[in-house]
Each structure stands twice: as C-alpha cells, then as structure tokens.
Amino acid sequence: MTATSEATVADGLGSALVSYPADIASSLADSTKKVHGKLMGNIEWYFEHWVDIYEEIKAENQDKLGSFSLADVMGALPNAKVASDIAGRVRLRVPLLKGQDALCAQCADMLGAVPGIDQVHVSPITGSVLAFYDTDEFSSLSDLLDSLRG
C-alpha cells in the first residue's frame, strides 16, 4: 500500500473539517480559481457597461439641464435653502448646480476667494454648497449671506 498525501480543510479555529487526497484538493483549488476569475471578469464587464450607460444618460440630460452662468448661481446663493447651519459651517442647497460640473468648480473657486471663507465644497450630484467660514469675519449666517449679496 502506498502512502497518499492529503490536504485538510480547517475552520477558522484550526480544527480539521475534512481531509481530501492531495490530487482532489488541488483540482478543487484550480476549479475555484477558474470560477473566481470568471466571476471577477463578469463583474468588471458589468461595471464598465454601467459606467457607459451612466455617462450616456448624463450627456443626454446635459441638454435638458439648461445653461446657467456663475452670476446666476451667485445670485441664487443668498436665497438658497439652508440645509444645515452651525457656527462656522453652512450647507446650502442650490438646485441650479445639479449636474453642472464646470459651474460647480467655478462656484467653489469664486467662494473660496471670498475673505473669511476658509474652505468650500460644491457637489454637482446634490447641488449643495458646503462652506466653512471664519466666525470672527462673519458672526452669523445672515452676515455671510449679506456679504454674498454685495
């Protein structure tokens, strides 16, 4: 009788669950690698197609969004809906910014240049403006919004 090598499958604690002859274990490992590779390839393919579909929809909707200027956005900021207001931090909702990537970047640059505004994040996905401002410069949200009107 010849000795055959065995492979053991263990649980997370190190206890042996099942022992297989080495050739069967190797075959199982190879099969698992093939299935895993095929599955990952399919996931990647689906992801790439979803990205393509998203970009196509975005391009189609760009025409429907309308064309707004930075002046339109800056004019809308003082009257924007305040989503949250904590001293030194405000989030404003500006529907004009939704889907407007370039306009959001321009708005962030413009607001970032205002003295007393420390940091600005503008999201084209949500149409929100998050601004962190110096409370010594602007004692309240209304002071900040008044300065943006001027």
Image (spheres, rainbow, N blue to C red):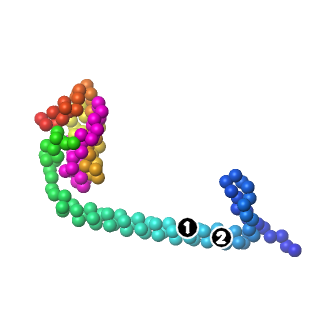
- In the rendered image, the quadrant that contains the N terminus is bottom right
102 is within the stretch colored magenta: yes
Q: Which residues are magenta?
A: 82-110
Q: Quadrant of residue 130?
A: top left
Say left or right for 136 vs 67. right
Which amino acid, mark 2?
A: Leu
| Residue drawn at x 75%, y 65% as measured from the top left | 19
Task: Judge whether residue 109 can be spotted in this image.
Answer: no
Which mark identifies residue 115?
none
Q: Is residue 102 left or right of residue 40?
A: left
Q: What amino acid does circle 1 point to?
A: His
Residue at x 21% of width, y 46% of height: 94
Name the element at disc 1.
helix
Residue 5 is covered by the magenta coloring: no
The picture places residue 142, in percent across and down from the top left corner, at: 19, 32
Which quadrant does the C terminus fall into?
Answer: top left
Q: Is residue 42 above or below residue 62?
A: below
Dot 2 corresponds to which residue? 28
Residue at 27%, 27% (x, y): give it: 135
The mark that comes first in sequence, 2 or 1, is 2
Q: Can you give x and y, in whole percent of width and height, for residue 92 in the image?
A: 24, 42
Q: Residues within 10 Å of mark 1 (few under 14, many from 20)?
A: few
The residue pinned by badge 1 equals 36
Taking the view exactly as shown, the residue that stands out farthest to the bottom is: 1
- Between 4 and 77, the residue placed more toward the observer is 77
Marks 2/1: CA–CA distance:
12 Å
What residue is drawn where x is 51% and y is 68%?
39
